[in-house]
């Protein structure tokens, strides 16, 4: 999800004289999409490199897995919304290539060019068909080890792509016997056959089917079928050889389907109806898989393999740990044959099916079919050889379908109707799989393989939960127990699986690193804090719900301050200590030496240093093994000195043509001596580079404009050498410096203030950055090869120096000319993001500056009512409740375990302390909230719109408008219900029009006035909408966003108390947001991810 700002600017070049200038919309992303929608791991940038590749909406993030963590190699924009990515290795190559499929069904195969260090496109094209109904389960892509690509985009058809390097993409379609395919996968086979296993659904339930692909006849032939698997089965996990087969993940069961019709099913208690979201393989043999559910719980699925059998086979599914708390498609390979396992759905239920692909006949031949598997079966996991087969995951059962009609089914209590969302293979032999459900629970599925049998076969399936993670969208098992959990609803995580559970929570999951994700953003508010605007977003969902406080720039957290006016320089010294223990403050005519005693600063005398003069520079020479380089400019004379072993030696000196205005010795490599100096001159506005030690000119450049250079710096950020020159008017020019000849290239310009700036190096978290001292202080850092300028939350900084003392670690000493401030620097990034975890889904947020509070609308499942799970509505200092009698069904009970509980919660806008929670009645949802004054009443109110929502009604018929008054000061914990107004419908949006409340209620827009009795009274209405979802007001104009009918502009006539329709967009647009840009321009966002005016 992007954070985007839109502004309107006039067109400077109208086509005809006399014509009004039209507005142009300038759109800029304040923050790139952070949600991880898919992830893969492999050797992409090098033969020995382990790369994690993340799909983030419209860009790829290529990450290198190193011993010290994850390092971003490159970010690659993609022209389109990425649906899925798959990593595969073409025949005869040592590195993997990447398949990318977009929402508009454009496919690309890309690889990494090692010599140019960039991404290259090997093949690309559209895979759309002229006819076909796009599948409700979304597109599915899988790649066979032979390089054959299978795409399920449309119902009933499978697109097969045969690709070779330096050739165009060639494809053909084969027909499924089933229409609704939930999930599918290739199956590993022993011969040349190509087989697939899939889950289908019909009116009788869901079925597991195995088919064989005939490339000559271009059809699928059924090999096996397992009917009526779990109705919630939705994930197919291929198990690699030697076991082979697939695992089907449901909410309550896990099914393994191996070779020779081997079926294993377990229904562990640990699943607890988890909705599994993704998986990751732990082992290359496919014996362990990590599963994650929608509650953030991580599971380990272990395949118990019978290694004594003639060929390894899965004999059981089990777990290795305990924790008390798309329907898909995939690939199986058996020798040289290629099989697909898929889940289909029809009127009879869901089915698991395996088919074999015949390249010669170009068709799919059915190998096996298992009808009426669990109705929620939705995931097919291929099991690699020697066991082979597939695992079918449902909500209550896990089914294994192996070779020779081996079927195993388990229904462990641990599943608890979990909705599994993704999986990952742990072993290469496919004996362990990780599964994730929609509650964020991670499971380990283990295939118990009978190794004593003539051929290894699966004899049992076992599963247990490992612990909680973020709600997983994708799982990628890296190595050595390290797993990447990509999330759509919360922050993505890098976790380690431990061999022993944690003592506090009995979890086997240890979080190593967290990656901030703002998505999904459901609402946004702007709040001013210390003169700086910051954005509050309603981010995440379910247990990952949170508020994110976003402000532009980098924060300085003040730790100490002392008033010292007229500061001209700040330096730190280490005297008899490894840490800084003295601060030198230079004034215009004197110098102060401050000794640091803990957190206190004491003015003192040191080493008979002169303190009645201005100090130009102070520092330590260091040890005798270190040579300190020093350049000094005096008028036109430049001296190069070296300091070491308590001596100062002049190496070279030169007289230049002009007087020197600023000078810097280039810091390019920390471990070697500097060989360049940069000089700025007073005359002719010149800058030049000189080589050391002979101070010979390398290059010279005239600066643009009439301002003189006041500060110059040459430094290396990431892998680029920059020369930065700050001019007297606050303008900063920066160049790329050529490593070979010192040429200045690619000049760019930035504005960093209005007064002469100074450039200063400092280190934060081991990385060097540039602090710009000016009347608009900023930090310059490099991100992905580009310079980023980020403001600092201080009004003015004239001097700065790094400080690392016993009491102030990794800090900065700064002066604004009047006060010395010691503070620590936030994490260096363009936007500073603070997270306030809520533990619930948050829908709306609004700020009320008059009471220094903010109100949010949250919801939590009723199942959390008596649990110890963290929840904002249960943590509030004060609580109250109310419910409506109008439209309330007598059969609805507060003690019902279905549905959600909706609440209105107020928070302190500074500390974000939870002040008051007002809980709504059963089946009542809070939809909208605003903070406003009404009529002549001076009090500022919170107004909340609610609706009674029942599953058997197409739209809400009753609702309420609640008017709350929040206390001030010590009474802020009190939220008083002043008035409630019964309405006929759902109040989707509210705003204020001339002191009156305007509300979008179902298919109408209604205006309420606030009476002297503090009651809302209906004044007028406007109809003719499908569903009015959004309302915005500007002056007397009202902008209405409709569910299907785009936008309408109304004009309010106060004298007549009526609305007049003045403009309407007659196009069919499914609106997702509307806003006024100015009085004549409206901005709309529609469900196809497009903005229009």
Image (cartoon, grey):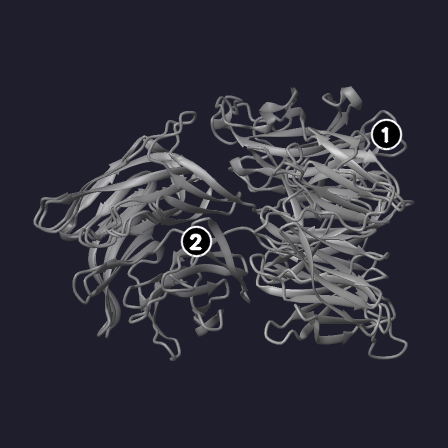
Residue density around tag 1, few if under 14, some if 14–19, many if 20 or more, within 10 Å? some
User: Which residue is more in the foreground, 930 or 578?
Assistant: 578
The single residue placed furthest to the right in the displayed view is 1055
Q: Position of residue 241 (x, y in %)?
A: 21, 55
Query: Vertically, is 238 above or below 607?
Result: below
Q: Nearer the viewer, residue 480 or 324?
A: 480
Task: Give whichever of 753, 235 is nearer the camera.
Answer: 753
Q: Where is residue 193? Give x, y as percent.
A: 20, 66
Above-or-below relation of 305 to 244: above
User: Residue at point 82% right, 31% down?
Assistant: 850
Residue with the mark numbered 2: 65
Task: Look at the numbered discs 1 and 2 and tell me whether their residues touch, using CB distance below 8 Å.
Answer: no
**Spatial CA span between label 1 and label 2:** 65 Å
Q: Residue 413 location, x and y as percent?
A: 31, 30
Mark on residue 988?
A: none
Where is residue 307? Give x, y as percent: 14, 45
Q: Residues within 10 Å of mark 2 (few under 14, many from 20)?
A: some
Q: Which one is nearer the viewer's eye here, 844 or 762?
A: 762
Picture quadrant of residue 1014? top right
> Mark 1 vs mark 2: which is more N-terminal?
2
Q: In front of the other: label 1 or label 2?
A: 2
Helix, strand or loop status at disc 1: loop
**Image quarter (top left, top right, bottom left or bottom right) of the C terminus:** bottom right
Residue 306 visible in the current orientation = yes
For numbered disc 2, what is the local secondary structure? strand
Whether residue 1000 is visible, yes or no, is: no
Q: In the drawing, does residue 854 fall left or right of residue 843?
A: right
Q: Which mark is residue 1011?
A: 1
Residue 179 appears left or right of 317: right
Marks counted in the figure total 2
């Amino acid at each position: 999800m992007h954070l985007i700002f839109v502004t309107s600017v006039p067109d400077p070049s109208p086509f005809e004289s006399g014509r009004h200038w039209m507005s142009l919309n300038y759109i800029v992303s304040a923050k790139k999409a952070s949600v991880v929608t898919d992830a893969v791991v492999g050797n992409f940038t090098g033969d020995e490199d382990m790369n994690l590749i993340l799909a983030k909406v419209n860009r790829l993030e290529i990450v290198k897995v190193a011993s010290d963590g994850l390092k971003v190699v490159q970010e690659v924009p993609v022209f389109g919304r990425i649906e899925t990515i798959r990593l595969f290795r073409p025949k005869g190559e040592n590195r993997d290539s990447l398949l990318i499929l977009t929402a508009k069904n454009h496919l690309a195969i890309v690889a990494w060019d090692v010599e140019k260090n960039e991404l290259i496109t090997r093949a690309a094209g559209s895979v759309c068909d002229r006819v076909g109904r796009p599948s409700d389960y979304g597109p599915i892509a899988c790649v066979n080890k032979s390089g054959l690509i299978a795409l399920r985009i449309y119902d009933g058809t499978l697109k097969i792509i045969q690709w070779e390097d330096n050739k165009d993409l060639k494809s053909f379609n084969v027909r499924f016997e089933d229409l609704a395919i939930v999930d599918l996968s290739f199956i590993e086979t022993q011969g040349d056959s190509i087989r697939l296993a899939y889950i289908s659904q019909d009116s009788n339930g869901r079925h597991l089917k195995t088919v064989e692909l005939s490339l000559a006849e271009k059809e699928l032939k059924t090999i096996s079928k397992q009917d009526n698997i779990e109705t919630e089965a939705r994930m197919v996990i291929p198990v690699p050889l030697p076991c082979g087969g697939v695992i089907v993940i449901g909410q309550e069961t896990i099914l393994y389907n191996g070779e020779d019709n081997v079926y294993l099913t377990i229904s562990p208690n640990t699943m607890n109806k988890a909705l599994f979201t993704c998986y990751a393989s732990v082992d290359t043999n496919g014996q362990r898989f990590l599963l994650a559910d929608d509650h953030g719980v991580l599971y380990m699925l272990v395949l118990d393999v019978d290694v004594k059998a003639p060929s390894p086979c899965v004999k059981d599914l089990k777990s290795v740990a305990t924790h008390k708390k798309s329907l898909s498609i995939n690939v199986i390979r058996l020798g040289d044959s290629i099989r697909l396992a898929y889940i289909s759905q029809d009127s009879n239920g869901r089915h698991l099916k395996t088919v074999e692909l015949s390249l010669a006949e170009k068709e799919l031949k059915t190998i096996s079919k298992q009808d009426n598997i669990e109705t929620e079966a939705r995931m097919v996991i291929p099991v690699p050889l020697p066991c082979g087969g597939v695992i079918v995951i449902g909500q209550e059962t896990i089914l294994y379908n192996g070779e020779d009609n081996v079927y195993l089914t388990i229904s462990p209590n641990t599943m608890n109707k979990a909705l599994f969302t993704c999986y990952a293979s742990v072993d290469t032999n496919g004996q362990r799989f990780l599964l994730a459900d929609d509650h964020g629970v991670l499971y380990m599925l283990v295939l118990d393989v009978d190794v004593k049998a003539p051929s290894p076969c699966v004899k049992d399936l076992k599963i247990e939960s490992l612990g909680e993670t973020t709600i997983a969208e994708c799982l990628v098992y890296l190595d050595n127990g390290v797993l990447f959990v990509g999330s759509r609803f919360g922050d993505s995580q890098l976790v380690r699986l431990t061999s022993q559970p944690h003592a506090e929570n009995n979890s086997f999951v240890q979080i190593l690193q967290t990656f901030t994700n703002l998505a999904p953003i459901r609402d946004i508010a702007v709040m001013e804090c210390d003169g700086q605007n910051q954005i509050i977003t309603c981010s995440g969902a379910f247990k990952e719900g949170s508020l994110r406080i976003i402000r532009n720039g980098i924060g300085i957290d003040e730790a100490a301050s002392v008033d010292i006016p007229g500061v001209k320089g700040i330096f730190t010294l280490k005297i008899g200590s490894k840490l800084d223990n003295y601060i030198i403050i230079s004034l215009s005519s004197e110098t102060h030496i401050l000794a640091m005693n803990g957190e206190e600063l004491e003015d003192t005398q040191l080493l008979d240093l002169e303190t009645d003069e201005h100090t130009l520079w102070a520092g330590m020479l260091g040890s005798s093994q270190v040579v300190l380089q020093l350049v000094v400019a005096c008028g036109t004379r430049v001296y190069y000195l070296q300091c070491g072993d308590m001596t100062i030696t002049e190496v070279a000196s030169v007289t230049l043509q002009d007087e020197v205005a600023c000078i810097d010795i280039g810091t390019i490599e920390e471990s070697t001596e500097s060989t360049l100096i940069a000089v700025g001159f007073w005359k002719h506005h010149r800058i030049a580079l000189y080589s050391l030690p002979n101070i010979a000119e390398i290059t010279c450049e005239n600066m643009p404009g009439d301002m003189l250079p006041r500060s110059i710096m040459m430094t290396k950020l990431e892998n680029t050498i920059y020369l930065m020159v700050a001019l007297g008017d606050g303008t900063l020019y920066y160049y790329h410096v050529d490593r070979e000849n010192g040429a200045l290239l690619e000049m760019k310009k930035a504005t960093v203030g209005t007064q002469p700036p100074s450039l200063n190096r400092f280190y934060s978290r081991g990385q060097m950055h540039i602090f710009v001292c000016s009347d608009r202080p900023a930090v310059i850092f490099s991100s992905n090869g580009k310079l980023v300028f980020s403001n600092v939350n201080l009004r003015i900084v004239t001097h700065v120096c790094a400080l690392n003392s016993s009491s102030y670690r990794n800090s900065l000493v700064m002066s604004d000319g009047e006060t010395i401030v010691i503070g620590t620097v936030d994490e260096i990034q363009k936007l500073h993001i603070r997270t306030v975890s809520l533990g619930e889904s948050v829908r709306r947020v609004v700020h009320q500056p008059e009471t220094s509070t903010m109100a949010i609308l949250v919801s939590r499942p009723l199942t959390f009512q008596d649990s110890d799970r963290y929840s904002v509505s249960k943590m509030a200092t004060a609580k109250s409740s109310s419910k409506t009698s109008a439209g309330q069904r007598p059969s609805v009970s507060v003690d019902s375990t279905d549905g959600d509980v909706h609440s209105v919660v107020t928070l302190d806008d500074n500390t974000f302390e939870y002040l008051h929670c007002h809980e709504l009645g059963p089946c009542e949802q809070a939809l909208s909230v605003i903070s406003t004054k009404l009529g002549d009443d001076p009090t500022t109110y919170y107004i909340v719109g609610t609706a009674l929502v029942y599953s058997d009604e197409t739209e809400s018929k009753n609702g309420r408008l609640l008017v709350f008054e929040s206390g001030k000061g010590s009474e802020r914990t009190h939220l008083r219900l002043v008035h409630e107004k019964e309405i006929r419908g759902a109040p989707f949006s509210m705003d204020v029009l001339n002191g009156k409340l305007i509300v979008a209620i179902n298919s109408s827009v209604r205006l309420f006035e606030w009476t002297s009795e503090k009651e809302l009274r209906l004044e007028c209405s406007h109809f003719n909408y499908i569903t009015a979802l959004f309302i915005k007001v500007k002056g007397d104009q009202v902008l209405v966003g409709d569910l299907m009918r785009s936008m309408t502009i109304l004009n309010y006539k106060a004298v007549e108390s009526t609305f007049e329709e003045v403009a309407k967009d007659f196009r069919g647009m499914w609106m997702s947001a509307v806003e006024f840009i100015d009085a004549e321009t409206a901005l709309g966002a529609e469900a196809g991810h497009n903005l229009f005016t």
